[in-house]
């Protein structure tokens, strides 16, 4: 494997995927990118961060949106797509610089497809565990947590599938899929570290 390591993590809402990704980055000594990349993009592009956050990982609204094919490039007037492309370019630039990192979401396994050092992982969880984690994190009741989980997963699935050939959550899209409910956060991190270690030194 190449000296560069890029770990792309997709996740179901409430699965603990973000926490697992961050812990992996810390324990492996890798840079970590999530929605906070928007801070750098906002400063670089001179755009209000609140504007970027509003449309982060949101699928394109079909009403009023259009794309214009300009030979080799497709241009869109969809705010959601423009912001998605800004993030995709950001990820590519980091990878092109030879940086090793952990990235959460943003269709990274598709954006960086074919790179030698890429390891793609999808983290899911038992629905009851995801609901309980959402209740605890946001201080909401079970009914609200169920609605929130379903809504976020629906949005993530739609966003991913618009920008990727592989389907969100489909095991064929990733190198490894793991249910965090079986081993817990720390146990899942430990297992993933072993897997990544095997891949690195293969």
Image (tube, rainbow, N blue to C red):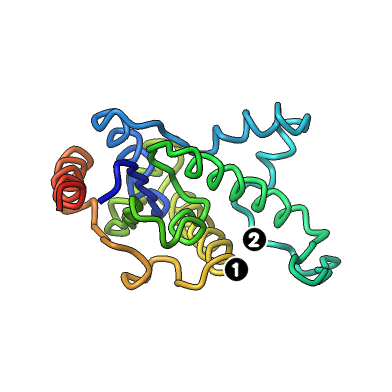
**Looking at the image, which is closer to me, 20 or 14?**
20
Q: For this view, does 17 lie left or right of residue 67? A: left
Q: Position of residue 178 (x, y in %)?
A: 24, 58
In the displayed structure, would residue 42 be above or below residue 180?
above
Query: Disc 2 designates what residue?
Result: 59
Q: Position of residue 74 (x, y in %)?
A: 76, 66
Disc 1 to disc 2: CB gap under 8 Å: yes
Q: Secondary structure at mark 2?
A: loop
Is residue 54 or residue 95 the one in the foreground? Answer: 95
33 vs 133, left or right, is: right
Q: Position of residue 36 (x, y in %)?
A: 55, 32
How many residues crowd mark 1 within 10 Å: few (<14), some (14–19), many (20+)?
A: some
Q: Nearer the viewer, mark 1 or mark 2?
A: 1
Viewer-side residue, 150 vs 77? 77
Name the N-terminal-most of marks 1 and 2: 2
Residue sitting at 61 percent across and 48 percent down?
89
Residue at numbered disc 1: 162
């Amino acid at each position: 494997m190449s000296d560069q390591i890029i770990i792309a993590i997709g996740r179901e809402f409430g699965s603990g995927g973000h926490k697992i990704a961050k812990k992996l980055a810390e324990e492996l000594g890798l840079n970590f990118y999530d929605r906070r990349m928007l801070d750098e993009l906002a400063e670089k592009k001179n755009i209000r961060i609140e504007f970027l956050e509003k449309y982060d990982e949101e699928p394109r609204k079909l009403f009023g949106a259009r794309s214009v094919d300009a030979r080799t490039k497709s241009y869109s007037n969809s705010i959601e797509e423009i912001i998605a492309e800004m993030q995709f370019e950001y990820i590519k630039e980091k990878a092109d610089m030879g940086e090793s990192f952990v990235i959460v979401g943003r269709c990274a396994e598709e954006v960086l497809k074919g790179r030698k050092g890429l390891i793609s992982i999808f983290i899911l969880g038992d629905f009851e565990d995801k609901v309980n984690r959402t209740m605890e994190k946001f201080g909401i009741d079970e009914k609200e947590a169920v609605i929130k989980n379903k809504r976020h997963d629906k949005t993530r699935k739609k966003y991913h599938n618009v920008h990727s050939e592989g389907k969100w959550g489909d095991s064929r899209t990733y190198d490894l899929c793991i249910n965090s409910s079986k081993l817990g956060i720390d146990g899942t991190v430990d297992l993933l570290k072993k897997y990544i270690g095997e891949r690195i030194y293969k």
